[in-house]
């Protein structure tokens, strides 16, 4: 089948097209898979022949190895495979690729199920279906191996691994036939059964496909398909002491599940000829239904400032460089979720980066942009002071009355009045951000500064600034401690300037600042996250990614937040006005002890 050239065409449902969508459209139009039958569960040709015509127009699959937590790269694959199935009337399978007996862990299995569900997908064609697992197909894989042996397509090789490596040749040199290559099928079958029955030591021999030791594609030089490995498997226990190799197992898993389009990352391109070879041998032998699945490759996601390898992520976790798999600085889906990422933001990202056939790097700011865009629409607003210093309104008692607290209000979302209003107080003392006061302001600084003489000798009047949703104030100056650090800022309130009251805008101001009253402000822990790595490609070119950790990737501050945030629930997202988007931490946030994580700033300060 030829692959049409990618274009930027748009499909009728207004999804941007890509080469995979075009291949599927072509297959649907040509009826490539229209004759297939599905007996309701995975199985061989005989099993599927008993079924109805497959109600799924296409079948795709997401086949993680349960040896770690999923990351943003997996999310690209999930959105792609589940998205294609959804858009083309198909079904996407969630399959645990657990053919390697040593690596399975139920913690990982559960986390993968949660991640796929969190992204909003259901698998295997029914809500809450049990995911498939590759180890359930061991019996068939064994039978397929015997079939290959009987048909003269596989042999047991007793060369040492070293001999095998040397005899495989390399790019410039063809391989050399193993002395065991010409054994008869009967001999091979007997040996293979001895392997299965535990009569040989681990590594003593392997079963190899007999293809072509001179092939230009080294993957076709009689690849190993079964090895001896005494290991207890989480699913099959000690039933087997031989296990299939991934390259043999994977196409069979796809075929038993009636997968039509088996989509994997580009590294597997050189494996496709073996995939096709194996599918031909097993369909012509009548073991598997026809037509078999076909493999397609797309470029994996490479994202700057993170590592996306389960092994490297595990190292960060187990070396305690981060707090766990769900550390908000990690690109794991649990980490991103705790950071404040939503499924919508991740879907938008997957759509925006698209699917191509050539590797490239995506800037981390693209991911952040997607979060910012989705949160701008949905996150309610609040005021927070991250580095609080007290502002005293010295004339409050005369103008407003001693001890008086005035009511202020603001919309929960500026573009969604239907969401309602938040209420808070203003009084003689309010918290403001330390950076909002400058004794000698730089040019263009419009927030709080006292009357002063500037660098060019000009007398500058004290600034007038609006306390957002409150009154206009005029700066007096600041009280400092012995070290010259500001401990209190003083200002006067200008009467009749309260936001929303008649004539309130009579006094013009250039600066508006956010604040929280001392009377009703709530103390909160705020975790300000930055990039985990200070290098854009921490593991590229043989670099040691652990050397590139950003020492300032987490700063914890005690902030004062608006009273409306006292009732925030874990996972609730907010825009802290002027600061960015924050999420109530799903692990540590509790009533009476609020904890917020910085999800993303208001502006992209990195991309440029
Ligand atoms: P890792 O190296 O992180 O362990 P993996 O590819 O070995 O990744 P699997 O569990 O085998 O992890 O992956 C499941 C699926 O996710 C595969 O189909 C794989 O192609 C896809 N996938 C993994 N990483 C990425 C990525 N960075 N971009 C796109 N797809 C990915
Ligand atoms: Mg892997």
Image (cartoon, rainbow, N blue to C red):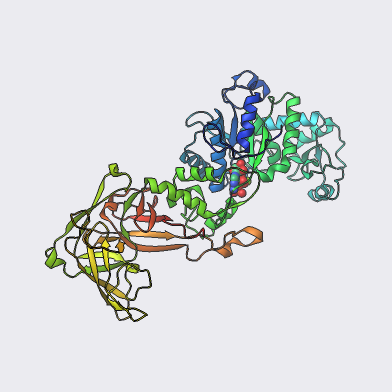
User: Relative to 103, does residue 502 appear above or below in the rendering?
Assistant: below
Q: Does the image show residue 288? A: yes
Examine the rendering and report whether any part of residue 229 can be seen.
Answer: no
Residue at left offset 37%, top offset 80%: 456
Q: Position of residue 520 (x, y in %)?
A: 22, 58
Number of numbered discs: 0
Residue 196 position in % (x across, y down): 72, 36
| Nearer the observer, 133 or 475 | 475
Q: Quadrant of residue 449?
A: bottom left
Camera-side residue of 192 and 456: 456
Left or right of 168? Residue 246 is left
* Image coordinates for residue 405, horizontal then vertical, percent: 16, 59
Between 240 and 185, which is closer to the camera in this rendering?
185
Write down which quadrant ligand 1 falls in: top right
Q: Horizontal and vertical percent for residue 314?
A: 56, 53
For the point 73% across and 23% down, the residue is 286
Q: Is residue 308 left or right of residue 172?
A: left
From this view, report whether residue 71 is shown above or below residue 41: below
Q: Quadrant of residue 259?
A: top right
Q: Quadrant of residue 37?
A: top right
Residue nearest the viewer, comparing 48 with 308: 308
Quadrant of the rendering where the N terminus is positioned:
top right
């Amino acid at each position: 089948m030829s692959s049409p050239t990618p274009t930027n065409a748009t499909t009728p449902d207004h999804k941007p097209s890509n080469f995979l969508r075009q291949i599927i459209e072509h297959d649907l139009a040509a009826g490539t898979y229209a004759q297939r039958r599905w007996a309701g569960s995975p199985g061989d040709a005989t099993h599927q022949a008993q079924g109805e015509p497959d109600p799924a127009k296409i079948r795709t699959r997401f086949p993680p190895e349960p040896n770690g937590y999923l990351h943003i790269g997996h999310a690209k694959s999930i959105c792609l495979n589940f998205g294609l199935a959804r858009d083309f009337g198909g079904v996407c399978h969630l399959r645990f690729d657990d053919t390697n007996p040593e690596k399975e862990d139920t913690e990982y299995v559960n986390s993968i199920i949660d991640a796929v569900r969190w992204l909003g997908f259901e698998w295997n064609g029914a809500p809450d279906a049990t995911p498939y697992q590759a180890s359930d197909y061991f019996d068939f894989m064994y039978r397929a191996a015997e079939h290959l042996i009987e048909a003269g397509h596989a042999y047991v090789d007793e060369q040492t691994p070293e001999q095998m490596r040397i005899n495989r040749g390399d790019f410039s040199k063809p391989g050399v036939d193993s002395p065991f290559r010409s054994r008869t099928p009967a001999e091979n079958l007997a040996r293979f059964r001895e392997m299965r029955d535990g009569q040989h030591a681990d590594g003593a021999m392997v079963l190899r496909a007999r293809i072509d030791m001179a092939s230009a594609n080294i993957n076709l030089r009689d690849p190993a398909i079964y090895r001896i490995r005494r290991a207890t498997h989480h699913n099959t226990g000690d039933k087997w002491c031989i296990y299939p190799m991934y390259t043999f197992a994977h196409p069979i898993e796809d075929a038993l599940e009636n997968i039509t389009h088996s989509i994997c990352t580009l590294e597997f391109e050189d494996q496709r000829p073996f995939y096709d070879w194996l599918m031909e041998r097993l369909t012509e032998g009548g073991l598997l239904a026809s037509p078999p699945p076909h493999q397609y490759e797309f470029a994996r996601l490479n994202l700057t400032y993170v590592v996306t390898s389960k092994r490297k992520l595990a190292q960060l976790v187990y070396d305690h460089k981060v707090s766990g798999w769900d550390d908000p600085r990690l690109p794991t889906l649990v980490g991103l979720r705790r950071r404040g990422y939503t499924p919508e933001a991740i879907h938008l990202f997957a759509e925006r980066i698209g699917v191509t056939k050539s590797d490239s790097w995506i800037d981390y700011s693209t991911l952040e942009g997607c979060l910012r865009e989705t949160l701008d629409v949905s996150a309610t607003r609040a005021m927070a002071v991250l580095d609080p210093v007290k502002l005293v309104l010295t004339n409050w008692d005369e103008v407003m009355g001693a001890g008086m607290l005035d009511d202020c209000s603001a919309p929960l979302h500026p573009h969604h009045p239907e969401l309602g209003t938040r209420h808070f107080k203003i009084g003689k003392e309010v918290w403001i951000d330390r950076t909002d006061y400058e004794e000698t302001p730089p040019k263009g600084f419009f927030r709080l500064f006292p009357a002063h003489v500037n660098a060019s000798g000009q007398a500058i009047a004290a600034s007038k600034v609006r306390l957002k949703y409150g009154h206009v104030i005029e700066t007096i100056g600041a009280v400092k401690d012995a070290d010259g650090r500001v401990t209190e800022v003083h200002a006067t309130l200008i009467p009749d300037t309260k936001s929303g009251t008649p004539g309130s805008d009579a006094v013009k101001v250039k600066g508006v600042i956010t604040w929280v009253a001392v009377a009703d402000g709530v103390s909160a822990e705020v975790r300000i996250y930055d990039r985990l790595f200070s290098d854009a490609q921490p593991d590229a070119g043989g670099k040691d990614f652990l050397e590139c950790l950003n020492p300032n990737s987490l700063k914890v501050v005690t902030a004062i937040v608006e009273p409306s945030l006292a009732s925030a629930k874990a996972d609730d997202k907010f825009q802290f006005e002027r600061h960015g988007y924050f999420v109530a931490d799903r692990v540590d946030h509790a009533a009476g002890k609020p904890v917020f994580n910085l999800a993303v700033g208001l502006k992209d300060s990195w991309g440029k």
